[in-house]
């Protein structure tokens, strides 16, 4: 019996723990999402990749050292041809041409180095890589902003679904009580069967709508779990919708430091630097190079490993060189690449102008929506209170036999409509505030 009791106790404790749902505030959701979201993890990796690209570009300015070792077997011995006059008295016949045949085997070893002294192309590429790093950082900021907006929208919708569930639960309790009363009146012969049927149908409709909002609420919580990258089985809930609308204060002008605007501006800067990098290829480059090594020749390969026969066949191969590279003609390749980048810059300017106009429109729409929905919310809240009073009066009259069932159900429907409109206006106010906070660059206020 003891193991069975322990097992049952464990099951009870687990069920109790799973049943305790943690209520997440909007601030907690945003902080968790920024910390865990997989899309943001990829954005952070993009920043690291851009830093590596910048380091790689700058490393091209550093000296390069390399070691070289080569063994050559001339299957056909190489030969140099010269005039007999250059060979001197060793060739008295003085023929027109003389052939000097080289050794069959050669071995080369040495250390080479090369360092750019002046290369405008590398410098311009480094500046372009720096701009790419800035773009990655701005893309991460934009991703954080988008994630914050997504979490905020889903959170407010979940609050609205939770509030509608609560109101429907009150309506179900009220309708259940009414159904009990109507059933007693029907048994006493006071009301008709059709009146009882109407109440029962209305009660079932309310229960079906409550289940619908409960399912919608769970779907919204699942979406929140996905955005926060927490396990689907994690118990969670959102805080109840506040009774009043809390305004975030006065909203200023549109922020000029919005990530989407900075991204487009930085892309224009990147294109300008890419144009400079292409034009820098017209500029001569200077580099310093050299080698420290030796080259040896032997008639027989084994002689390389006999010092007695191979020492005098090794020759120094050491030099230092200053190289100047002057581009002359590249078949208009650079000119055409510059032209392509100029088209890209015109497109970037158009996209920036379009984005500014779109932001202006969104700001105006959000301001109007907030103002309109505040008025709607105040009106619907007053209608909600009046509908409650009217329903309470009609319910008393129905119990006294003065009002009909049709009047009571109509007043109940008006009450539900006022409740739904009030919650919807509250939710739309929150969404409009969220948009205004984004456009004014104040989304960080949500995490304070």
Image: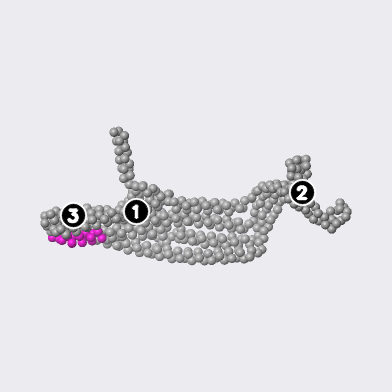
Q: Which residues are magenta?
A: 402-418
Q: CA distance from mark 2 to mark 3?
A: 115 Å
Foreground residue, 102 or 64?
102
Characterize the magenta stretch by its predominant secondary structure: helix
SS state under label 2: loop
Q: CA distance from mark 1 to mark 3?
A: 32 Å
Q: Residue 163 at what x, y percent from top left?
A: 29, 54
Q: Taking 4 as reference, is 345 left or right?
A: right
Q: Which mark is residue 219?
A: 1
Quadrant in the picture for the N terminus: top left
When asked about the image quadrant of residue 84, the answer is bottom right
Q: Residue 286 at what x, y percent from top left?
A: 66, 56
Q: 10 Å neighbourhood of mark 1: few (<14), some, or many (≥20)?
A: few
Foreground residue, 341 or 426?
341
Residue, disc 3: 179
When asked about the image quadrant of residue 191, the answer is bottom left
Whether residue 163 is visible: no
Label whose residue precedes the other's in the sequence (2 or 3): 2
Closest to the camera, between mark 2 and mark 3, is: 2
When asked about the image quadrant of residue 375, the answer is bottom left
Residue, disc 2: 103
Q: Residue 196 at what x, y percent from top left?
A: 17, 57
Whether residue 336 is visible: yes
């Amino acid at each position: 019996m003891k193991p069975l009791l322990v097992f049952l106790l464990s099951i009870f404790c687990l069920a109790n723990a799973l049943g305790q749902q943690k209520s997440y505030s909007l601030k907690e959701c945003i902080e968790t999402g920024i910390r865990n979201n997989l899309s943001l993890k990829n954005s952070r990796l993009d920043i690291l990749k851009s830093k590596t690209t910048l380091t790689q570009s700058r490393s091209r300015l550093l000296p390069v050292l390399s070691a070289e070792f080569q063994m050559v077997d001339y299957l056909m011995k190489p030969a140099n041809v010269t005039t007999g006059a250059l060979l001197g008295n060793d060739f008295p016949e003085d023929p027109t041409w003389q052939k000097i045949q080289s050794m069959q085997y050669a071995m080369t070893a040495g250390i080479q180095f090369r360092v750019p002294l002046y290369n405008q192309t590398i410098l311009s590429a480094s500046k372009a890589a720096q701009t790419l790093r800035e773009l990655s950082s701005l893309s991460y900021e934009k991703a954080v902003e988008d994630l914050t907006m997504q979490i905020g929208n889903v959170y407010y919708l979940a609050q609205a679904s939770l509030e509608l569930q609560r109101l429907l639960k009150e309506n179900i309790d009220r309708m259940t009580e009414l159904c009990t009363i109507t059933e007693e009146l029907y048994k006493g012969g006071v009301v008709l069967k059709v009146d009882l049927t109407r109440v029962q149908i209305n009660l079932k409709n309310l229960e079906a709508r409550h289940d619908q909002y409960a399912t919608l609420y769970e779907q919204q919580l699942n979406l929140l779990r996905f955005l926060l990258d927490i396990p689907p089985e994690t118990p969670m809930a959102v805080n109840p919708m506040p009774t009043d609308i809390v305004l975030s204060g006065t909203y200023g002008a549109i922020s000029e430091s919005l990530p989407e605007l900075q991204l487009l501006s930085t892309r224009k800067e990147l294109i300008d630097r890419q144009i400079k990098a292409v034009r820098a290829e017209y500029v001569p480059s200077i580099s310093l190079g050299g080698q420290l090594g030796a080259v040896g020749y032997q008639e027989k390969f084994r002689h390389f490993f006999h010092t007695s026969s191979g020492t005098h066949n090794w020759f120094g191969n050491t030099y230092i060189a200053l190289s100047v590279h002057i581009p002359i003609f590249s078949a208009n390749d650079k000119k055409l690449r510059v032209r392509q980048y100029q088209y890209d810059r015109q497109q970037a300017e158009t996209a920036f102008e379009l984005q500014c106009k779109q932001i202006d429109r969104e700001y105006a729409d959000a301001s109007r929506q907030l103002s309109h929905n505040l008025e709607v919310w105040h009106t619907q809240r007053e209608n909600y209170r009046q509908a409650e009073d009217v329903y309470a009066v009609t319910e008393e009259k129905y119990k006294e036999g003065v009002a009909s069932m049709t009047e009571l159900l109509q007043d109940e429907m008006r009450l539900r409509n006022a409740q739904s409109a009030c919650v919807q206006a509250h939710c739309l106010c929150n969404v409009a505030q969220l948009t205004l906070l984004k456009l004014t660059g104040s989304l960080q206020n949500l995490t304070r």
